[in-house]
């Protein structure tokens, strides 16, 4: 029995079949990495949170062909949500983004059915014309998701993470999206130095009250080549243990209103790209531990 509304069960309820996300990398870049004075978030590696396909020079057509085939073989899913994941999708000029989206839809339709689109971005990179564009796409009968990297609603944490935006920027972005036709998903991180065990729950509950309906959680983990790796190796950052993370994330989920969708319970990274904590590499074990903790909370 699930003690939370998982993404897969939500998709099955909504579409009556198995649906999977296909992650695509347009090489959109991120203004926060590229500005000379900014340097990017402390945890961000060269792939900008994605597959690294654009960096490796893999064209969109190939990403779609091999990705759709892998999803069919592994998950038996015929229906897809195209997820423009890496860096910040809205960093592309809007006409270029629209062109890439149209192209991706055309190419995917040769291999699978598309039921939705998802766009990953930052709260300070959501101009009004992008919101109108997402609304138009949603008006064409596709489910459209905008995934905002929030990470925390603590000002100190945002500064420590070197996010380059503050809490009011997140609040304004979420509230501007509230009466639109698309859905909002927020990404949140547990284990930021200086946060107490309930900060994740406070951040998630506030976002839900502003109109976010889905969440992706992960612990703060160290990737090779990041500024966070330097902090970790200098002994200035200690990652959470799996038990600590399970406790924090279960409390956050318990603080959400009924119906909130949990798109991700933990991260997905493996060595050698992953430096620490190594429990992140065993996702199935981490998920089982969190689900056990959720069950215990629901019975208490
Ligand atoms: S906003 Fe995203 S892509 Fe940009 S630096 Fe931060 S984590 Fe990396």
Image (cartoon, rainbow, N blue to C red):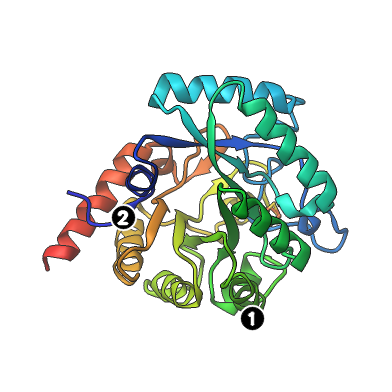
Tell me the quarter of the picture where residue 33 sits.
bottom right
User: Label 1 near label 2: C-beta < 8 Å?
Assistant: no
- Camera-near label (2 vs 1) is 2
Front residue of 177/50: it is 177
Q: Residue 63, image x and y in percent?
A: 65, 26
Tell me the quarter of the picture where residue 162 sits.
bottom right
Front residue of 279/207: it is 207
Name the residue rendered at 84%, 48% in the picture. Answer: 95
Which quadrant is the C terminus positioned in?
bottom left
Name the residue rendered at 74%, 54% in the picture. Answer: 90
In this view, the residue farthest toward the left is 299
Q: Residue 153, image x and y in percent?
A: 54, 75
Residue at numbered disc 2: 5
Q: Secondary structure at mark 2?
A: strand
- CA gap, disc 2 to disc 1? 28 Å
Residue at numbered disc 1: 168
């Amino acid at each position: 029995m699930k003690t939370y509304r998982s993404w897969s069960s939500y998709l099955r309820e909504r579409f009556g079949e198995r649906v999977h996300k296909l992650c695509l990398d347009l090489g959109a870049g991120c203004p926060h990495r590229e500005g000379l004075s900014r340097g990017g978030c402390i945890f961000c590696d060269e792939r900008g949170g994605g597959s690294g396909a654009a960096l490796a020079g893999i064209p969109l057509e190939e990403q779609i062909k091999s990705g759709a085939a892998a999803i069919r073989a592994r998950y038996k899913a015929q229906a897809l949500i195209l997820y423009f994941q890496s860096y910040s999708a809205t960093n592309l000029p809007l006409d270029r983004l629209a062109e890439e989206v149209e192209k991706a839809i055309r190419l995917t339709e040769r291999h699978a059915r598309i039921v939705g689109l998802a766009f990953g971005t930052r709260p300070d990179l959501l101009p009004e014309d992008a919101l109108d564009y997402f609304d138009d796409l949603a008006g064409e009968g596709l489910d459209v998701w905008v995934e905002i990297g929030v990470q925390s609603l603590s000002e100190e944490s945002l500064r420590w993470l070197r996010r380059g935006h503050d809490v009011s920027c997140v609040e304004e972005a979420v509230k501007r999206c509230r009466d639109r036709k698309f859905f909002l998903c927020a990404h949140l991180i547990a284990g930021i130095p200086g946060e107490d065990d309930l900060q994740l729950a406070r951040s998630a509950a506030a976002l839900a009250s502003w109109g976010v309906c889905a969440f992706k959680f992960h612990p703060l983990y160290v990737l090779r080549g990041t500024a966070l790796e330097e902090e970790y190796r200098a002994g200035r950052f200690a990652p959470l243990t799996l038990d600590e993370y399970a406790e924090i994330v279960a409390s956050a989920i318990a603080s959400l209103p009924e119906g909130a969708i949990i798109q991700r319970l933990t991260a997905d990274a493996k060595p050698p790209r992953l430096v620490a904590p190594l429990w992140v590499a065993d996702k199935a074990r981490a998920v089982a531990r969190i689900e056990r903790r959720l069950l215990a909370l629901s019975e208490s």
